[in-house]
Amino acid sequence: MLHPKFSHFYTPDFPNISHELKLTNHTQTVSIYCKQNFKIILEIQMEKTKKNYPVLLDRFKAVFADSIVLIILMKIITDIFSLFDNVPDISRAIAFVFIFFLYDPLFTSIFGGTIGHRINGIRVKKEINTNKNISFPMAFIRFIIKASLGWISMLTVPSDEKKKAIHDNLANSIVIYKIENS
């Protein structure tokens, strides 16, 4: 996250001109001033990507989409198993557990979110560096907490400044809207 900064420096080649650079959470402004503090010609504002945090409804839409994806994956596995004679029940159980327990952590750690997250334009990132995905172990811990608590984990989303669920707090993750170049 960018913290407000102020930088003021003089151009060695032009001692009567100074530059001012201000960075805030939302904009970057570059201004050129002459030494007498009169603003000259150029002011550029570039919108920084705002880190908007998804509301509860967007997160529920992602969970719903992921539920459909899991049902489809389980149907595909069932159809594949039906092609073979005498598939042991333990093999079926392992396949379904594998799908259920690894879908969310794998997609979250590799792609920054599940298919449901991507459909809804949201990503799961490290809270300390929103350009990086969380690691697989943290994504797995996040999923286990989320699955264990169910909807209770989402109770903190409306009141939290960054719209973090309980499982986000415990995994040091944050859910944000997709940044345009990610």
Image (spheres, rainbow, N blue to C red):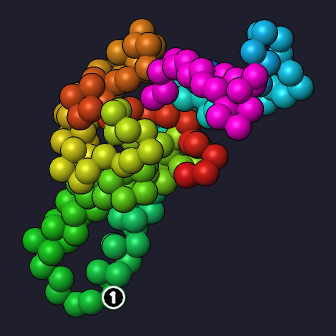
Q: Which residue is mark 1?
A: 83
Residue 161 lies, with reference to residue 69, above or below; the image says above
Is residue 40 among what the camera can see?
yes
Q: Residue at x 34, y 73 (%)?
A: 77
* Image quadrant assignment for residue 42: top right
Q: How many marks?
A: 1
Sort mark 1 into few (<14), some (14-19) or many (20+) by Cα contacts within 10 Å.
Answer: few
Q: Quadrant of the N terminus?
A: top left
x and y, in percent, of residue 142 in the image: 24, 39
Q: Specify whether residue 170 is painted magenta.
A: no
- Residue 45 located left or right of residue 60: right
- Magenta span covers which residues? 1-20
* Image quadrant assignment for residue 79: bottom left
Q: Residue at x 58, y 42 (%)?
A: 179
Q: Residue at x 15, y 75 (%)?
A: 91
Is residue 45 among what the camera can see?
no
Q: Residue at x 30, y 30 (%)?
A: 168
